[in-house]
Image (spheres, rainbow, N blue to C red):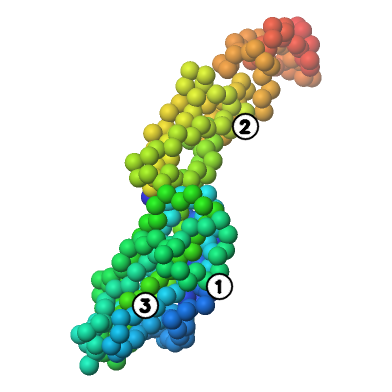
């Protein structure tokens, strides 16, 4: 899968490190959190004693139903229509908490709201659209805490066809003991590439999973399009180039190299790509008292007669 085979230099937002950046093979949108509302920002260390910062909430001892929100800043979608959200989090096993209330949950909700500008803190729940309820594959217990086992979970969810310039994400706690460790937001596209001497630009993958985007290629320098079969490829929804069709050919005087046409282009227009005929000629050269016979292969170009520029005719 080509998650952006270009490798842009982009930022991976991690709650534990706001400035952690990597060169990744897909476009990543930086996510900055606003006021955590009912979530707390906590600093600590992971199981390898590396410093981390998390947003967490754990009001499981409260007898009332919980409704705690954490919202991101505004995220510009940058042309992406099919957005992916990757979450890393830990979640406590309710059965491992002594005296826990019956309202304890082991899930939380992921939501979003589209907009053309930064909405600030969005407090109206009815403006949000729910993406999914997020559950942990592994929840941690009191024993895991003693052994410093984080039981980190990773979940990826997709936001459907987007039309506005950007969006906010939100995380709703309804009574769990959960810590959000990292959030990564990205979309997929096919990377710029050269195929059959044609250049294809970066192309955003379509929102529909089964949709292929047909892209016309542009011939590389010193090459010409095959008019009967111009170069085309198809960008899949997963960010992969598929079904190459057609090609370009090197112009006169150039030969195909590594994704390019190489040569000096010295052959005049209208001449053939093939090598001109060769003429064998014998010239008697005198050097002192000795005579040397040299066989020269004289290249005939444009019908010019062979030239004897240095020897003397016998």
Residue receiving disc 3: 67
Q: Which mark is residue 221?
A: 2
Q: Position of residue 144 (x, y in %)?
A: 27, 86
Distance of mark 1 from mark 2, alpha carbons? Answer: 40 Å
Callout 2: helix, strand or loop?
loop
For label 1, the SS is loop
Q: Are marks 2 and 3 in contact (CB under 8 Å)?
A: no
| Residue at 43 percent of width and 72 percent of height | 182
Look at the numbered discs 3 and 1 and tell me whether their residues touch, using CB distance below 8 Å: no
Cα distance in 3D space between marks 3 and 1? 30 Å
| In the rendered image, the vertical position of residue 102 relative to residue 20, given as above or below | below
- Tell whether 233 sits left or right of 8: left
User: Quick one: label 1 or label 2, which is nearer the N terminus?
Assistant: 1
Q: Which residue in the protein does label 1 denote?
A: 19
Which residue is pictured at 57% across the width and 30% down the height? 219
Q: Residues within 10 Å of mark 3 (few under 14, many from 20)?
A: few
Relative height, residue 24 to residue 275 (above, below): below
From the top left corner, tell me how far across and down residue 114 is, in percent: 48, 58
> Which of the 4 image quadrants contains residue 287?
top right
**Closer to us: 152 or 218:** 152
* Callout 1 crowding tier (Cα within 10 Å): few <14, some 14–19, many ≥20: few
Quarter the C terminus occupies: top right
Residue 200 is marked as none
Q: Position of residue 44 (x, y in %)?
A: 44, 87
Residue sitting nearer the eye, 138 or 77: 77
């Amino acid at each position: 899968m080509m998650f952006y085979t270009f490798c842009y230099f982009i930022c991976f937002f991690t709650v534990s490190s706001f400035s952690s950046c990597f060169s990744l093979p897909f476009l990543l949108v930086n996510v900055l959190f606003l006021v955590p509302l009912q979530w707390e920002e906590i600093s600590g260390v992971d199981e390898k004693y590396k410093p981390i910062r998390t947003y967490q909430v754990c009001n499981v001892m409260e007898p009332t139903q919980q409704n705690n929100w954490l919202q991101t800043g505004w995220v510009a979608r940058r042309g992406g229509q099919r957005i992916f959200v990757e979450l890393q989090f830990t979640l406590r096993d309710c059965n491992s908490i002594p005296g826990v209330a019956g309202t304890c949950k082991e899930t939380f909700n992921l939501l979003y709201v589209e907009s053309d500008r930064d909405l600030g803190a969005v407090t109206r729940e009815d403006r949000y659209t729910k993406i999914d309820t997020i559950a942990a594959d592994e929840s941690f217990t009191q024993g895991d805490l003693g052994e410093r086992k984080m039981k980190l979970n990773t979940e990826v969810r997709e936001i459907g066809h987007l039309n506005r310039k950007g969006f906010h994400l939100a995380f709703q706690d309804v009574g769990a003991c959960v810590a959000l460790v990292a959030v990564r937001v990205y979309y997929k596209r096919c990377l710029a590439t050269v195929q059959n001497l044609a250049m294809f630009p970066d192309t955003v993958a379509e929102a529909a999973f089964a949709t292929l985007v047909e892209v016309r290629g542009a011939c590389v320098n010193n090459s010409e399009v095959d008019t009967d079969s111009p170069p085309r490829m198809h960008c899949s929804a997963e960010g992969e180039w598929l079904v190459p069709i057609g090609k370009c050919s090197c112009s006169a005087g150039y030969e195909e190299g590594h994704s390019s046409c190489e040569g000096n282009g010295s052959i005049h227009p209208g001449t053939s790509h093939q090598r001109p005929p060769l003429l064998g000629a014998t010239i008697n050269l005198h050097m002192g008292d000795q005579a040397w016979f040299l066989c020269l292969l004289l290249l005939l170009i444009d019908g010019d007669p062979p030239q004897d520029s240095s020897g003397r005719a016998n």
